[in-house]
Amino acid sequence: MFNSPIIDLALTLSFTYFSLSLTVSTIHEYLSALLNKRGEYLKNAIDCLLFDQDWKKIAEKLYNNPNITSLKKDLNSLPSYIPAGNFAAALMDQFKDDKNIILDMNKIRDVLTDDGIAAQVGISAGIRKLLLNFYERAQGDLQSFQKQIETFYNSAMDRASGVYKRSSQLIVFIISVVICASLNVDTINIVNKLWGNQEALKHTADNLQTVVKQVNEKGYNPKTDTIKFEASKVTVIKNIPADTSKNAPNAKKVAQQISTVSTFLVSSGIPVGWTAQNTPDLKDKTFCQSLLSLLTKITGLLLTAIALMLGAPFWFDLINKIVSLRAAGKKPEEEATTPTKNTTVTVKPVG
């Protein structure tokens, strides 16, 4: 088993960045929902889905379809997330007849192959060509046809999501800087304080390793689950529904998460917060010494903010690699138990 202080420090920093990255993500989601930026970006992505002039008319119909309007927070807002199933169902509704009964596959084929019928429905040649490909792959099965639409939509939204994340980098960085400055999460200070007290460093790393181990035993998945931080414990909440305008974070939830994450880090032995121990002492110092202390503080905060830009999934993956390295040589642990909905993990406070 490795007892290197470097490994302990790497685990401590990675967990700090991981927990704060979750907070930054929550704040970003809150601001996006508040300004409806994600909804606007999603609508624009769907409008440009096929780069077909007639598609925009169909896209407008889709946004008025009950499968999508049900995702809106109110009548004047746009949904911030549309599941593939809802999108496919809304598109399939375009193939309903005058009696509002969904067409069978033979009639769908007629709509896609007959110019006259297609014109009545309002489906252009470009859209028909795409849907005909789906029709051929479905081999006459209606559910398979809808599944083809869902797969196409998911692929398109993955690309759109990547573009959205890149366009949001500046906002995320600003949020990261504000969080780091507010909570005084200074990478240089953390390294100096813990490296100077390696017994406290080992205790902190042991605590965090226990938390990570138990979180993993409950099957935590950064893409579908979330972690709720409390004073001296974390709770894994499994299978969070995909984000929509209706369940987006609110101001109270954001404020509570900022407070609890800070409290959790402090109780774990990580030197954060604007305490006397974590604040530069400028008394009896020359101007140059004071300036150097302030520049060191700013640099430490910026280093943390830059680290948060990598995102929670990156840091959680790195945490697991560090834990595996730290626990090298130990006997294999028993297989994880079946994940439960909520799992609480308590850490031992330092001091």
Image (tube, rainbow, N blue to C red):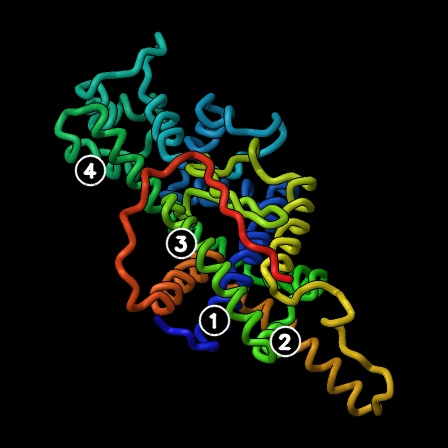
Give coordinates of residue 342: x percent, y percent. Answer: 46, 36
Query: Quick one: 348 or 277, which is closer to the camera?
Result: 348
Q: Is residue 287 left or right of residue 12?
A: right
| Residue topped by disc 1 | 8
User: Residue 218, located in which quarter of the rendered image?
Assistant: top left
Q: Residue at x 44, y 28 (%)?
A: 62
Using the numbered discs, state the Cα–Cα distance from disc 4 to disc 3 in whole angstroms: 47 Å
The amino acid pointed to by label 2 is: Lys
Asked whether the residues under the numbered discs 4 and 3 touch, taking CB atoms below 8 Å apart as contact, a structural biologist would say no
The amino acid pointed to by label 1 is: Asp
Location of the N terminus by quadrant is bottom left
The local crowd at label 1, few if under 14, some if 14 to 19, many if 20 or more residues have their Cα within 10 Å, is many
| Residue topped by disc 4 | 133
Give coordinates of residue 278: x percent, y percent. Answer: 72, 71
Sequence-first disc among 1 and 3: 1
Sequence-first disc among 1 and 2: 1
Using the numbered discs, state the Cα–Cα distance from disc 1 to disc 4 in whole angstroms: 54 Å
The amino acid pointed to by label 3 is: Lys
Give coordinates of residue 24: x percent, y percent. Answer: 59, 55
Residue 238, above or below 184: above
Sequence-first disc among 4 and 3: 4
Using the numbered discs, state the Cα–Cα distance from disc 1 to disc 2 in whole angstroms: 13 Å
Sequence-first disc among 1 and 4: 1
Residue 346, above or below 130: below
The local crowd at label 3, few if under 14, some if 14 to 19, many if 20 or more residues have their Cα within 10 Å, is some
Sequence-first disc among 2 and 4: 4
| Residue topped by disc 2 | 193
Element under disc 3: helix
The extreme top residue here reads 99
